[in-house]
Image (spheres, helix red, strand yellow):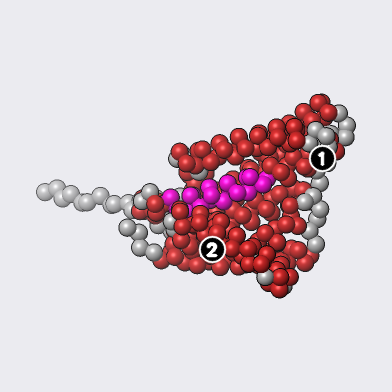
Amino acid sequence: MTTLTPQNTVERRSAPIPLSRLVRVELRKLVDTRAGFWLVASMGVISLVVAVVMLIARRNSPEKLDLSGFVTVMNMPTSVILPILAIMLVTAEWSQRTALATFTMEPRRERVVLAKLGASLIAAIGAVVFALVIGALANVLAGVVYGAPAGAWNFSGADLVNSLTIQVFGLLVGFGFAALILNTPGAVVAYFALPSAMGIVAGVVPWFRDHLGRWIDTTSTNQPFQTGDWASGIEWARLAVSAMIWIGIPLALGIIRILRSEIK
């Protein structure tokens, strides 16, 4: 009589999804919707328009047509649009009801949040690099059309650090509000309305502007980083305090909400 012994079953455990792959997926999510695609495209179009406008408007002040000037001005519209991209990247999981699929494929929610944050920071760096490229092209054109002193390659380490600081700060503010509210319209309104309200209060109440406003009003704390000069220690300290209020608190509470909220 022959007896059949059951074959040994081998437990197969799938390897965890690499964080780098999660980041690539989140980067793709930035542009795979119509809204995301057109926001990214608008940043490119606006940068080109800004370069052309500067070449025309400053034709009588050629000394202002240098690389530092081009990059600084181009970073302004980008610093407004980029946080909206970060907001949509976070809130889309709930507004488009894809959170269930996302957190099923990667149950460790903190890794998904980290991947979204990493993708957002990469987008911020990409925005600065893009501004540098377009600014360099506009700078060459200014030198050819107007001659010296236009087209000077004045761009210091302070310019680069300040550009990155402004982009990352605004992006993290939007990311924090998005994580806290988990709703695209609500996060966008909070991103624009709350800091603006703080700026209005600082403008109306002199005592607030001269004391607390210097430390918590983002318009005031960001202003030293919109130039080509190195920020002082006290200016970095003020930026850090405003970051703790406008980034640290919303982001910490938002992450707790994401980790604990029920996915429907």
Q: For marks 1 and 2, give the CA distance.
A: 39 Å
Q: Is residue 157 left or right of residue 15?
A: right
* Amino acid at the residue labelled 2: Leu
Most foreground residue, 47 or 113 = 47
* Amino acid at the residue labelled 1: Lys
SS class, disc 1: helix
Q: Position of residue 124 (x, y in %)?
A: 62, 47
Name the residue beneath numbered marker 1: 64
Name which residue lies at 59% across and 63% down. 197
The verdict on residue 91 being magenta is yes
Q: Residue furthest front?
A: 204
Name which residue lies at 47% across and 41% down. 35
Q: Position of residue 214 (x, y in %)?
A: 71, 67
Name which residue lies at 51% across and 54% down. 188
Q: Is residue 252 left or right of residue 233?
A: left
Name the residue beneath numbered marker 2: 251
SS class, disc 2: helix
Most foreground residue, 17 or 6 = 17
| Between marks 1 and 2 in the image, the one whose residue lies nearer the viewer | 1
Binning the other alpha carbons within 10 Å of mark 2 as few (below 14), some (14 to 19) or many (20 upward) gives many
Q: What is the span of residues highlighted in magenta in the rendered image?
A: 75-92
Q: Residue furthest right?
A: 148
Q: Who comes first in sequence, dot 1 or dot 2? A: 1
Binning the other alpha carbons within 10 Å of mark 1 as few (below 14), some (14 to 19) or many (20 upward) gives some
Disc ID at residue 237: none
Q: Is residue 143 visible?
A: yes
Most foreground residue, 29 or 43 = 43
Name which residue lies at 54% across and 63% down. 251
